[in-house]
Image (tube, helix red, strand yellow):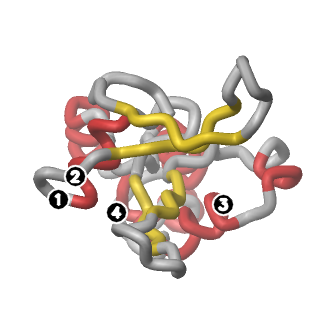
C-alpha cells in the first residue's frame, strides 16, 4: 500500500510535484534561455509540466499595462517598436524580443532587416525646447 501512495505523489514522468514546481521556477521563460539551464532541466525531467505553457501566457505579461507589469512575476521581455517609412502617415508596428530597458538600435535593425535606411528617434532639443527627430547611428546605443 505504501508504494501505491508514493506513486500517487508522482506525475507520469516520475518527478514529485514539489520538485517539478521548483525546477519550473528555475527555468528561464525568456526566448534567450540559457542552454545549460535548459539541458539540466531536461535531464532532470522538469519540463514535463511545461508542455501546456505556450507563448500566449508569456505574451499576456508583455501586453499588460505598465502599472500591472511591476506586479507580475516575469519581467517584460519584448518591446513594441513603431516606425515610419519615408513620409507615410501610418506607422508600422513590430515587436522586438528584447526588454525595453536593454533595447539597442542594432536589435531594431536585426528585426527590420532593411539596408540603406537612416534611423531617427524623437528627442527634445536643448536649445529650443522643441521636439525634433534625432538621427541614431551607433548600433550599441540604447533607445
Residue nearest the observer in this picture, 81 or 137: 137
Q: Which residue is mark 4?
A: 13
Q: Which mark is residue 61?
A: 3
| Marks 4 and 2, how far apart at CA | 52 Å
> Does residue 100 appear in the picture of this structure?
yes
Q: Which residue is mark 2?
A: 117
| Marks 2 and 1, how far apart at CA | 6 Å
Q: Please report contact status of discs 3 and 4: CB closer than 8 Å, yes or no.
A: no
Residue 122 x/y as whole percent? 59, 43
- Which residue is at the far left? 115
Q: Please report contact status of discs 4 and 2: CB closer than 8 Å, yes or no.
A: no
Q: Please report contact status of discs 3 and 1: CB closer than 8 Å, yes or no.
A: no
Give the label, 4 or 2, closer to the camera: 2
| Marks 1 and 4, how far apart at CA | 47 Å
| Marks 2 and 3, how far apart at CA | 32 Å
Residue 124 x/y as whole percent? 70, 31
> Does residue 19 appear in the picture of this structure?
no
Q: Which residue is mark 1?
A: 114
Amino acid at each position: 500500500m505504501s508504494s501505491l501512495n508514493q506513486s500517487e505523489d508522482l506525475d507520469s514522468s516520475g518527478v514529485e510535484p514539489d520538485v517539478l514546481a521548483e525546477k519550473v521556477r528555475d527555468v528561464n521563460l525568456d526566448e534567450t534561455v540559457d542552454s545549460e539551464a535548459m539541458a539540466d532541466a531536461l535531464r532532470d525531467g522538469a519540463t514535463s509540466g511545461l508542455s501546456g505553457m505556450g507563448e500566449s501566457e508569456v505574451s499576456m505579461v508583455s501586453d499588460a499595462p505598465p502599472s500591472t507589469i511591476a506586479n507580475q512575476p516575469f519581467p517584460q521581455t519584448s518591446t513594441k517598436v513603431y516606425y515610419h517609412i519615408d513620409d507615410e502617415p501610418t506607422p508600422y508596428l513590430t515587436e522586438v524580443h528584447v526588454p525595453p530597458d536593454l533595447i539597442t538600435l542594432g536589435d531594431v535593425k536585426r528585426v527590420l532587416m532593411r539596408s540603406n535606411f537612416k534611423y531617427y528617434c524623437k528627442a527634445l532639443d536643448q536649445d529650443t525646447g522643441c521636439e525634433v527627430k534625432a538621427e541614431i547611428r551607433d548600433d550599441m546605443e540604447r533607445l
